[in-house]
Amino acid sequence: MSQMIKKVLIANRGEIAVRIIRACREMGIETVAVYSEADRDALHTQLADEAICIGPAPSTESYLSMDRIISATIISGADAIHPGFGFLSENSRFAELCEQCNITFIGPGSDVIARLGNKQEARNTMVAAGVPVIPGSKEPVYDAKEGAKIAEEIGYPVIVKAALGGGGKGMRVAQTPEEFESSFQTAQKETQMAFGDNTMYIEHFVQHPRHIEFQILADSHGHVIHLGERDCSIQRNHQKMIEESPSVAISEELRRKMGEAAVKAAKAAGYVNAGTIEFLLEKNGNFYFMEMNTRIQVEHPVTEWVTGIDLIKEQIRIASGRELSYRQEDVHLTGHAIECRINAENPEKGFRPSPGTITDMYLPGGKGIRIDSAIYSGYTIPPYYDSMIAKLIVWAKNRDEAIRKMRSALGEVIIEGIDTNVDYQYGILENPDYIAGNIDIEFIEELERARKEA
Amino acid sequence: MKLENMFKKTRAVSGRKGYISLRERRPEVPEGLLRKCNKCGSAIIAEDVKRGYYICPKCGGYFRVHAYRRIEMIADDGTFEEWDKELVGENPMDYKGYPEKLAAVQEKTNLTEAVVTGKAEINGMETVIGVCDGRFLMSSMGEAVGEKIARAVERATKERLPVILFACSGGARMQEGITSLMQMAKTSAALKRHSDAGLLYISVLTDPTTGGVTASFAMLGDVILAEPKALIGFAGPRVIEQTIGQKLPKGFQRSEFLLEHGFIDRIVEREELKTVLSEILQMHQESGRTYKRGAASERDAALEEQMEALAAPEEEELSAWERVQISRMKDRPVGSDYIQTLFTDFMEFHGDRYFADDKAIIGGIARFHGRPVTVIAQAKGTSTKENIERNFGMPSPDGYRKALRLMKQAEKFGRPVICFVDTPGAFCGLEAEERGQGEAIARNIYEMSGLKVPVLSVIIGEGGSGGALAMATADEVWMLENSVYSILSPEGFASILWKDSTKAKEAAEVMKLTARDLYKAGIVEKVIPEPAHYTVLNLEEVTDRLSEGMDRFLETYESMSAEELTQRRYERFRRM
């Protein structure tokens, strides 16, 4: 059997670094934390067996500094790097450097990261593997008549997009064939004005979709399994706020279909380690591949809870060359898990970050409650990094109970000295649409709109 | 709460002893993966440096580039054809150990000499290229270096190709004594012939360019570019410090310093270099060709009508003083607005090559309806800060000398010159007198009168005296409706003649300084109507008219021979 990793350097900070250190401690693996000058008192710095300062506060000079992290790894004698999420976790160049230096990168190979990081290439890989993608014109379209024909093939509603587009300019939706011509012309005119170009693309418009993602695990022996879905539709500006598993929108049958597609996608990409395939799920049950995340994700605890599988430990085992501990038939989703991200921010002031010192705090506990966090009483949240300070995860035997448990738990969270989004989260948990499971990716946007009007 | 040393560590938790790695290969950084930046001292990934134009990703500092790498960065793939690769020099002073030293350097660098020359294409345009390589005896200019450059330039002259030389040198090659000194003359003389043949030479100065190279081919470009922060100078900083016995200021002899002192046209980032070189080559390739002109003729007739209407008095006539005030309005469009609106691909060139780069004058090359032209504008600012920087549009002698340099350049390459005049007057100051304001103005008038290419001057605001004429000794001078052009400001006029500068208003009325007065007097050829409240917002009403007129102007004057052109210009002023 291949040699287990003995010492891991965690190239990250905050709660995920702590989460990884904990998994390592339980496995008897020694840990090396790296920290910036702003993180001297951070939990991950103190909890790890060793800690190495890698530079000043700005992440470009510390947590994103590849050469410094590599140097720290070599100096400390670690044999592997866990990149966590964000920072260098999906940087193929960094993974490649690890490979060149004979350091085990806990994640997929650099070539796989590079391939999946390129939108077009990832899409092509999925099309070739038979994974559904959003249907769209392959060639640029210049003319409304020609466009109408393509739109018919793609299926309404469609969205007309500027080839050079961005910022919502030059984009128009046509719900029906009757609307198409005027939508196309308006979009093209806007495109001409904004970009001095009239090249358009047409795509199927996925209306009010849910964000559904599938967790997969793949070992280096060719085994790939999926661990069911997470529904991450509650998001603001593409930042997820609440995630849950399973999704109310997914039947056993659909889970099987999407799970198979996810496994196919991972196999097509030659994927090894833990990864996530993101789909958009339409109301009628059609789903489309969006992208594959080649790292552990923030919301991994909900999957851990409903499957009973420790994803970080599996990552380390896979990186050590071991076979998966589970087969697909061993995976069952039991009960319901929900995660709320607790951020140091002020929802009343446009979700403005609120760094500062936590003067007092109390966090809930008890059956079915998990907190992944790196804060403690007296901790000063530095202004340089992400504002997420804790994840509150609950589990109960069904969704209704889980929602009640989450409300109860949120009601116990006391964090003094800074602003948090706890009350905002509480509001969502009381929203009738949320309770009814009636959600899509525009949920928060609509909530905000309603709030402003009120 | 302090957490320091509070937690039990993994070994205690797991009860395990320390370990010895059993893996065959322990993590290590392979040779050559990392390198050290000699500017900021930090470790950097060698591959990133290579991919990033040899620029330190940490501090942005520039690494010196080997000759062949430089060619790769500039030339189209596979187009470089090397010349005189085997050419080597001798040991003219029989300097002991020199041949051995050369052999050792050749062995170490895999180069035969300190410069690589040949022919290449840049975005499809053929050019002769020469690149110094600092690894070879600090690219000092020995006989072989001089010879290779001279031959390359001679061949460029013969084949009518432009030349681009990348300078990087410690100067003369001491081991070759006086022979090395003569290379300065050899290379310069070859470039003179190349220039006399009307051909383009672009010099690119890289870190370091010093000594005999600076004092010869490096400083002779029609266009001189430099990489940021390169050391450029004649005497090395250490020598200067020893001689004068004091410490040199920070940034002394760096590219930025030279730009400020008028010796280089532009500082170009390495990533941009190929694009900039290509644009310059392109502009110079097209010179002398014929261009499709807009259907200006009929529309121009309409303009004539408008002008005539203007010449006739209207009911609500503005007084001369009112026009003076309008010409000085803060929100009136300035020189740079016209450059932006009327031209495309404007590339600003800096410096007079003597003393400074005067920001009161903006000049460079651009395209007008696809055709390369030289554009020079007296530049007021649009904010107080910019106005201070541009000295409120009052040029110093350096500004006039820059304008003249660009006009002579235009003449060499057969480009028409278009000037925009907007100045209260040439700068009156101590420094301006020290550097010869009068001489600079005189020289411009003198040289412009004989310039062998069409020259058009448009007075867009204030046409203040000699300071204006130094950019208006043209084939035609046009004025915007509310611009003024006079011997002196009305304030100055009142002060001299009436000893009372507060009588400026009365002075304005008698000075005949409005566009209409001057048109009637035959001093200017055209008056361009302008909207009631003229700002950048309605700038196009004026530039559209200007543009039509300029098309017509170029059509007329470009068809004339140099003799005819200068004769007409001579007569234009002769009769005044």
Image: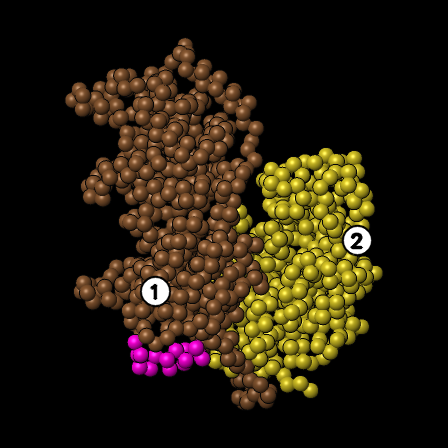
Chain colours: A yellow, B brown
In which quadrant is the C terminus of chain A drawn? Answer: top right
Residue B427 lies within the magenta run: no
Res A191 quadrant in image: top right
Q: Residue furthest top?
A: B315
Residue at (75%, 65%) from the top-left corner?
A265
Name the residue: 42% across, 53% down. Answer: B194
Residue type of the residue flagged with mark 1: Gln
- Magenta residues? B93-108
Under mark 2, the amino acid is Asn
Disc 2: CA contacts within 10 A as few (<14), some (14-19) or many (>=20): some
Residue B107 counted in the magenta span: yes
Q: Residue at image x 69%, y 40%? A: A172
Closer to the camera, B39 or B115?
B115
Q: Position of residue A388 (x, y in %)?
A: 55, 59
Residue A398 in view, yes or no = no
Place of residue A293 in the rendered image (x, y in percent of width and height, measured from the top left): 65, 63
Chain at tag 1: B
Figure check: B67 above or below B450: below
Residue at 53% from the left image edge and 41% from the top image edge: B289
Q: Which mark is residue A286?
A: 2
Q: Residues within 10 Å of mark 1 (few under 14, many from 20)?
A: many
**Quarter of the figure that contains the N terminus of chain A:** bottom right
Which dot marks residue B183?
Answer: 1
Q: Can you give x and y, in whole percent of width and height, for residue B132 in the image?
A: 42, 66
Secondary structure type for disc 1:
helix
Front-most of residues B310 and B143: B143
Q: Which mark is residue B314?
A: none
Residue B254 lies, with reference to residue A53, above or below; the image says above
B360, A429: nearer the viewer? B360
Identify the secondary structure beneath mark 2. loop
